[in-house]
């Protein structure tokens, strides 16, 4: 049975659509427990909703992007009959800037994260900008179980409910998928000598890092933006994420921070009144009546965390939210000021506010499984450690939810076993090379990232002002802050050096 086959589609029909790949972190004991999503873009204030961030760069259009499908084995690591079952994995290619196989021109391969590939093409502006710069092929590969890359014969919901099929939904399988597509594409293009840089942001940045470590013969290098590869087990304190969120709000406005910190007990006080939930629903103009105060608190947690994670110019959501809270246009009481912050975040006074605004069903369901199996990111905090209510990470509660939902226990040590993490500096210095990790310190996930050079080829680039994946998302502009321009220039210099070394080796040994 042939398991490698490309099928063309009549071009890519790409339409802008709202990406809701937002962190929806909660530090309360709501059921079910929500865990952080590692989206490249974020929430209501993502670039797709900003008219100043066009979907595609001026020199590229949707007709330049061609869609293909690869017949991918559902299981790369076993030889049972079911392992040979294939599904159609989507990938998208832009040949416009590629100088061709004869020139051994590079390939930039973007590794899809926990969403449809439609959410990447046209907004990950790092890709077209650098493909144009280096004369490279622009390649995007969709993550299995997301977008159109669903096991054959199943809907996404059916696949996630099927315990056997669901078991093939893992990072290791996804990375092997990417390897198969890249090898086959290079062969079809007679481009075996073309160097590959795998690129990813957030969870995709983790995948890019792990890909370079697992498949160094396929990828010459990896560029990982905002990849918290250390946020597993106890490699960083559990409260690292909420501590950075708190710091961001304190720096924006101390009074805003104090109001937020006081608001949790005020929400509980009102909720405990006989008609308290109805009062809160009216106060926050909710589209549906509250069933539990924790739902409102989770929503506000998400809004504050999203604001910090994606605190990008020119809008800077943390500052926007704090201006609303400090301005108190909806009253001087604590909850009135908090609601003013909500209105400011959306930049409009909506008819009503939906507590589900942040959450894409596709990302929610897929990420729920991934974090209940291998991606156990222990986020929590104790009393008075942050501006959030105390909610320590309790593995038993986490495990119980996953067992009830999926019938399996999480494997909290598997990521570090499979990819490493302990003694990371020593291990990567001895065994790794050509990995570039970038971060912005206003991003709470930077607390789980690599922030210093490990060797002369495993390099860290960061900016104090940067946020989650900021360096790869918006198109470069003369209006960009100087620190962002400098960060991107440094990243390009590093990649250019790697290409030069590769071509030197190719001339010597090719």
Image: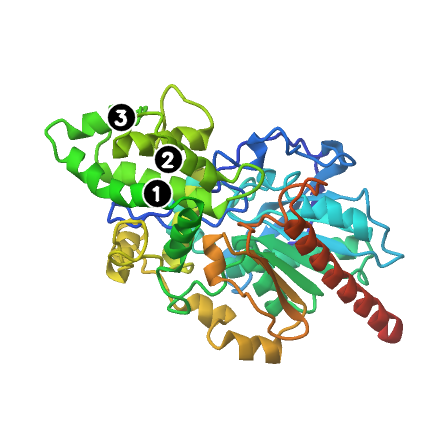
The N terminus sits in image quarter: bottom right
**What residue sits 72% from the left and 55% below the top?**
489
Among the two numbered marks 3 and 2 on one chain, the one whose residue lies closer to the N terminus: 3
The answer to whether residue 448 is visible is yes
Query: Taking 343 as reference, is 361 above or below it?
Result: below
Left or right relative to 65: residue 111: left
The answer to whether residue 158 is visible is no
Query: Taking 113 as reference, is 320 above or below it?
Result: above
**What residue sits 66% from the left and 32% below the top?**
54
Single out the mark in the foreground, 3 or 1: 1
Asked whether 41 or 338 is in front, the reply is 338
Among the two numbered marks 1 and 2 on one chain, the one whose residue lies closer to the N terminus: 1
Asked whether 380 or 388 is in front, the reply is 388
- Estimate how packed mark 3 is, as few (under 14), some (14 to 19) or many (20 or more) residues with alpha carbons within 10 Å: some
Q: Quadrant of residue 332?
A: top left
The spot of residue 80 in percent (x, y) is: 50, 62
**Mark 3 highlights which residue?**
283
Q: CA distance from mark 3 to mark 2?
A: 17 Å
Left or right relative to 277: residue 471: right
- Residue that protrudes farthest toward the top in the picture: 351
- Residue that protrudes farthest toward the left in the picture: 274
- Estimate how packed mark 2 is, as few (under 14), some (14 to 19) or many (20 or more) residues with alpha carbons within 10 Å: some
Where disc 2 sits, the SS reads helix
Query: Taking 446 as reference, is 63 above or below it?
Result: above
Where disc 3 sits, the SS reads helix
The C terminus sits in image quarter: bottom right
Label drawn at residue 255: 1
**What residue sits 23% from the left and 29% below the top?**
280
**What residue sits 60% from the left and 69% below the top?**
213
**Mark 2 highlights which residue?**
326
């Amino acid at each position: 049975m042939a398991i490698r086959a490309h099928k063309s589609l009549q071009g890519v029909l790409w339409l802008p659509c709202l990406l809701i790949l937002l962190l929806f972190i909660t530090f309360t004991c709501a059921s079910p427990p929500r865990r952080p999503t590692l989206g490249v873009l974020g929430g209501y204030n993502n670039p797709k909703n900003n008219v100043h961030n066009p979907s595609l760069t001026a020199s590229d259009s949707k007709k330049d992007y061609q869609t293909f499908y690869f017949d991918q084995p559902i299981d790369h690591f076993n030889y049972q009959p079911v392992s040979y079952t294939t599904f159609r994995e989507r990938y998208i290619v832009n040949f416009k800037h590629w100088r061709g196989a004869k020139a051994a021109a590079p390939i930039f391969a973007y590794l899809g994260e926990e969403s449809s590939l439609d959410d990447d093409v046209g907004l990950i502006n790092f890709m077209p900008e650098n493909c144009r710069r280096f004369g490279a092929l622009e390649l995007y590969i969709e993550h299995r179980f997301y977008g159109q890359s669903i096991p054959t014969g199943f809907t996404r919901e059916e696949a996630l409910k099927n315990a056997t099929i669901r078991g093939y939904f893992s990072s290791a399988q996804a990375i092997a998928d990417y390897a198969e597509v890249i090898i086959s594409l290079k062969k079809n293009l007679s481009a075996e000598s073309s160097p590959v840089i795998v690129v990813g942001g957030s969870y995709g940045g983790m995948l890019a890092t792990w890909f370079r470590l697992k498949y160094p013969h396929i990828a010459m290098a990896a560029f990982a933006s905002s990849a918290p590869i250390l946020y597993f087990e106890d490699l960083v304190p559990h409260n690292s994420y909420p501590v950075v969120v708190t710091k961001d709000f304190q720096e924006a406005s101390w009074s805003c921070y104090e109001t937020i910190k006081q608001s949790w007990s005020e929400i509980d006080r009102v909720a405990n009144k006989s008609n308290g939930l109805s009062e809160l629903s009216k106060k926050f103009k909710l589209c549906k009546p509250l069933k539990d105060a924790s739902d409102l608190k989770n929503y506000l947690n998400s809004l504050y965390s999203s604001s910090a994670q994606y605190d990008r110019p020119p809008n800077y959501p943390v500052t926007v939210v704090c201006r609303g809270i400090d301005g108190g246009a909806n009253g001087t009481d604590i909850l009135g000021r908090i609601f003013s912050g909500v209105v400011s975040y959306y930049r409009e006074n909506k008819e009503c506010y939906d507590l589900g605004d942040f959450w894409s069903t596709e990302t929610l369901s897929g990420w729920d499984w991934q974090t209940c199996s291998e991606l156990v990111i222990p986020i929590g905090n104790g009393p008075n450690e942050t501006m959030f209510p105390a909610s320590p990470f309790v593995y038993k509660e986490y495990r119980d939810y996953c067992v009830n939902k999926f019938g399996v226990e999480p494997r909290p040590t598997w990521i570090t076993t499979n990819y490493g993490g302990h003694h990371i500096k020593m291990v990567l210095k001895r065994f790794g090379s050509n990995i570039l990790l970038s971060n912005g310190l206003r991003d709470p996930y930077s607390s789980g990232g690599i922030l210093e050079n490990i060797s002369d080829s495993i390099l860290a680039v960061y900016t104090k002002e940067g946020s989650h994946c900021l360096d790869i998302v918006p198109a470069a502009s003369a209006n960009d802050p100087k620190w962002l321009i400098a960060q991107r220039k440094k990243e390009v210099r590093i990649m250019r050096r790697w290409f030069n070394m590769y071509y030197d080796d190719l001339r010597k040994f090719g």
